[in-house]
Image (tube, grey):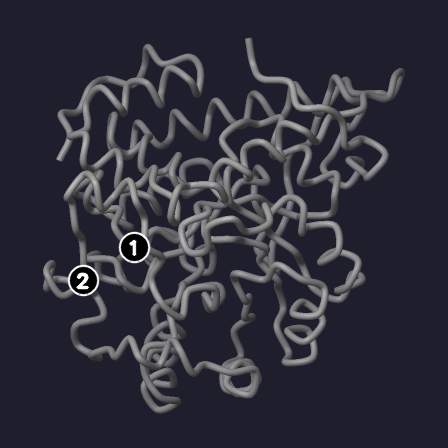
């Protein structure tokens, strides 16, 4: 676990990440930073976001900039979601509860990971009807139904089923650091009372997704969609949201970047459901690019870890404050007074330009 410092002197995301790297044990930093294999997909996520340029439009009235948005019916003060991260406890004793508290302070939502060590009900209670619950298919339909019943009773706003990781990716950086993490080793996960079986992740099917959507009155989003075909199939199954993600590049090496897949997914769902995205986003300008391609909100994963590492709830809150400022300023300067005003006309594929 890291040594906490006052995050009040942090003014940029680069400073925040540098501070996290200073205070964390190197193996913990590597565990979160690692991508599958050589890390090509992780690098591609960043490179593709770099190559997608913003196109400012002049002389719009941006005297007031509104960063609010919504996802699956939940109103949010800014278009940033806290993506599900199972091992947040490695970066803050508060685990998913700390993330939920930071999200609530910022007026946004978190995805409570099924494999968290926090009590699910305590996470939901930070803001009933605001936060989502993420589930891996690690049991049969009876098992999944029991999970859903508990999630409904807890007061979560919706369910996110992650489908992009039937098996865990092999990550060179993690292997080389020697650090290993598993829920079996922790033994304190909120899933403990239900049990789990990893083998079900390899057999979860479209019919299972349709069953889940029909089983619960809560809106369901499917996370890990990277193609138009899968997006359209998910809509037919009854989802309320499609979450574009390559798991931050942690499952398949040499895969397509998430931002490259976003446009075709948005076109495929054709306004029938909400679209979110994650994988590689760390700056407000990058988030605006995804909004321009049709996402309603953007998830951050690794940045959660870094924020929690430098100061728990306060550190993550600081990260969200910086992102809010970056988003608001970027929106004003590209001529977009609200999130809906950011359109495909505000982005264009260009040459890569590494930051100075």
Residue at the image point whose x is 37% and y is 82% from the top: 144
Q: Which mark is residue 183?
A: 2
Query: Looking at the picture, how far across and down is residue 105, in whole percent?
Result: 40, 37
Disc with the residue nearer the chain's start (2 vs 1): 1
Q: Quadrant of the N terminus?
A: top left
| Quarter of the picture holding the C terminus | top right
Q: In the image shown, does 339 or 171 lie closer to the viewer?
A: 171
Instruction: State if disc 1 and disc 2 touch (CB < 8 Å).
Output: yes
The quadrant in which residue 287 appears is: top right
Alpha-carbon distance for marks 2 and 1? 9 Å
Q: Which residue occupies 32% across, 31% down?
A: 306
Name the secondary structure under disc 2. helix
Q: Is residue 107 above or below residue 10?
A: below
Residue assigned mark 1: 86
Callout 1 environment at 10 Å: few (<14), some (14 to 19), or many (20+)? some
Q: Is residue 202 toward the left or the right of residue 72 in the image?
A: left
């Amino acid at each position: 676990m890291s040594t906490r410092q006052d995050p009040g002197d942090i003014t940029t995301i680069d400073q925040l990440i540098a501070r996290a790297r200073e205070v964390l044990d190197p193996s913990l930093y590597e565990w979160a930073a690692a991508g599958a294999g050589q890390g090509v997909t992780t690098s591609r996520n960043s490179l593709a976001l770099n190559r997608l340029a913003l196109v400012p439009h002049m002389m719009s009235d941006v005297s007031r900039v509104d960063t609010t948005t919504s996802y699956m019916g939940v109103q949010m003060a800014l278009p940033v979601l806290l993506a599900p991260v199972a091992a947040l406890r490695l970066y803050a004793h508060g685990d998913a509860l700390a993330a939920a508290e930071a999200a609530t302070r910022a007026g946004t939502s978190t995805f409570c990971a099924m494999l968290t060590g926090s009590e699910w009900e305590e996470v939901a209670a930070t803001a009933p009807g605001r936060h989502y619950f993420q589930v891996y298919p690690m049991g049969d339909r009876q098992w999944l139904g029991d999970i859903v019943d508990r999630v409904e009773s807890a007061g979560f706003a919706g369910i996110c089923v992650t489908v992009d990781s039937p098996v865990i990716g092999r990550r060179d950086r993690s292997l080389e650091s020697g650090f290993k993490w598993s829920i079996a080793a922790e033994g304190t996960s909120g899933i403990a009372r239900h049990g789990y079986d990893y083998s079900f992740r390899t057999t979860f099917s479209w019919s299972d997704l349709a069953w889940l959507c029909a089983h619960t009155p809560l809106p369901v989003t499917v996370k890990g969609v990277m193609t138009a075909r899968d997006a359209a199939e998910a809509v037919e199954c009854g989802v309320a949201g499609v979450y574009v993600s390559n798991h931050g590049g942690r499952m398949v090496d040499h895969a397509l970047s998430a931002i490259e897949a976003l446009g075709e997914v948005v076109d495929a769902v054709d306004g029938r459901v909400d679209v979110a995205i994650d994988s590689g986003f760390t700056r407000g300008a990058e988030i605006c690019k995804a909004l321009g391609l049709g996402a309603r909100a953007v998830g951050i994963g690794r940045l959660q870890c870094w924020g929690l590492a430098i100061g728990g709830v306060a550190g993550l809150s600081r990260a969200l404050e910086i992102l809010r400022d970056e988003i608001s300023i970027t929106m004003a300067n590209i001529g977009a007074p609200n999130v809906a005003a950011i359109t495909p006309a505000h982005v264009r594929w260009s040459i890569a330009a590494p930051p100075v």
